[in-house]
Image: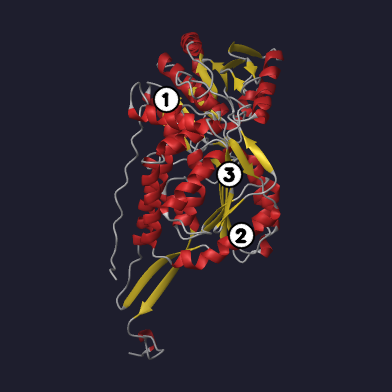
Amino acid sequence: MATGFFNVPAPKNEPIKSYGPNTPEKAALKAALAEARSKQIEIPMYIGSEEIMTDEKYAVTPPHDHQHILGYYSMGDASHVTKAIEAALAAREKWANLSWEHRASIFLKAADLLAGPYRAEINAATMLGQSKNAYQAEIDSACEMIDFLRFNVHYASQIYREQPQSSDGVWNRLEHRPLEGFVFALTPFNFTAIAGNLPTSAALMGNVCVWKPALTQVYAANVLMKVFKEAGVPDGVINLIYVDGPVAGDVILSHPDFAGIHFTGSTKVFQHIWKTIGDNLSLYKSFPRIVGETGGKDFVVAHSSADAKAVAVGLVRGAFEYQGQKCSAASRAYVPSNLWEDIKTYMVEDLATMKMGGTEDFSNFINAVIDEKSFDKIAGYIDNAKKDPRVTVIAGGNYDKSKGYFVEPTVLLTSDPMYTTMCEEIFGPVLTIYVYEPEKFEETLELVDKTSPYALTGSIFAQDRYAVELASQKLVNAAGNFYINDKPTGAVVGQQPFGGARASGTNDKAGSILNLLRWVSPRTIKETFVSPVDYRYPFLAEE
């Protein structure tokens, strides 16, 4: 048997394909879309070695075409949650003891499968199931998931390689054990890559997982599970279940072997989970790891020295790509009065050229929001704004759910910097702008810092370097990801690992070494080569 200290392949960000006219990737993706739309599939739960179907089935439909059925998933209940926990715990010892390079190999293979034979399928599933356009799906399902897998393997090798110093006659060693129990991965509706990373990052470090995706993400989650199985993830290591959140929580958060949660979702849900864990703390064998990325009320601040066109493009892209359904999406902006008219003109011009519709038409820049519940919530904010004397609708303001859940990109201008849509997370294509006087820049920065409980992303646009530095200092706690002269949505694995503090989560930076460290329990080992045989220390001797 060969042994050694192994260097993993050096990671680099997966190149983003263009999907331009007559490209092979565009042809492959269109074929995958047609194939997916031509049939209805049965989507099972994956528990241990079983693919489980139930009699309670729910339709999967594209948000932009909610009458078309892509398939049906089987809804589980508390018994399936218990079964998934049992399967995970049964697999734990063998998986935890597997040499780390073999765990790494599995996930490197998964990355290559996504980069190659599954690329079109995972992108098509994301386009149809979550209404993302081709470029968005390419970035945030294929490429980001590939990057998560490859960079996480690299970071894992760094963790294992880092060792303590040893004094004379002593060998100090450090090992990183998997957590004692199982990890609960609770994943969101909006991103396929996040859904895949939450269980795999923990599994890479030797943990076993129960994975519950948002029910609107089941279609793509099923493809990811196919990839994981083909890559060689053993039965029971990642168990995929479809149940209501409270049903899962009641079983999982009261289980003695609950070792941690990897979460992305709403702040309120995460707060409830944290409280429940605290209430149940005496039940657990160990203190659980609580890792979560939650909401955001992400800001753009423009200084009087900023380039008006750059600000306008940053606002339009930052607020309306992904239909604003991105926790980093720009949703509040502070614009100086000397630039406002130019910025408004540029924004209105750009918005007038944006087509809205289904993802299968590659000319559509705007697609549908994720489901009817989300649609109704966003429409409610828009309706209230239309009736409020403090607000002017600059662009958009219309919506229609007859065929799909479509909301026009909407720009609101408010005279009240504390108006509702400046403070509350909407999670949709609604941007609210407050115009301030240039001489009140520093006051405005203080306003930005205090307006929202969140601290996820934010950006400053300025040509004046003193203004950039001042904003960077004043807003140091207002955003975990901060951007200079760019939109606040540019997280890339290995470049700008993502996360925020305050009400935005635990800031454990998915796609970085910081996140992986949460999924291990270190053990230090000290070996003394020649043990003392006399208790007396030299200082005890007389002159």
Q: Residues within 10 Å of mark 2 (few under 14, many from 20)?
A: many
What amino acid type is highlighted by mark number 1? Answer: Ala
What amino acid type is highlighted by mark number 3? Answer: Ile
For residue 199, the mark is: none
Q: Residues within 10 Å of mark 3 (few under 14, many from 20)?
A: many
Asked if labels 1 and 2 touch by Cβ distance under 8 angstroms, the answer is: no
Q: SS class of the residue under badge 1?
A: helix
Asked if labels 3 and 2 touch by Cβ distance under 8 angstroms, the answer is: no
What is the x, y in percent for residue 93? 50, 68
Front residue (pair 13, 173): 13
Front residue (pair 427, 478): 427
Sequence-wise, which precedes: disc 2 or disc 3? 3
Q: Residue at x 40, y 67 (%)?
A: 174
Name the quadrant containing residue 251: bottom right
Label 2, on which residue?
A: 85
Q: Residues within 10 Å of mark 1 (few under 14, many from 20)?
A: many
Name the quadrant containing residue 5: bottom left
- Quarter of the picture holding the N terminus: bottom left
Label 3, on which residue?
A: 43
- Quarter of the picture holding the C terminus: bottom left
Front residue (pair 216, 509): 216
For residue 467, the mark is: 1
Sequence-wise, which precedes: disc 2 or disc 1? 2
What is the x, y in percent for residue 422? 61, 25
Between the C-alphas of marks 3 and 1, the distance is 53 Å
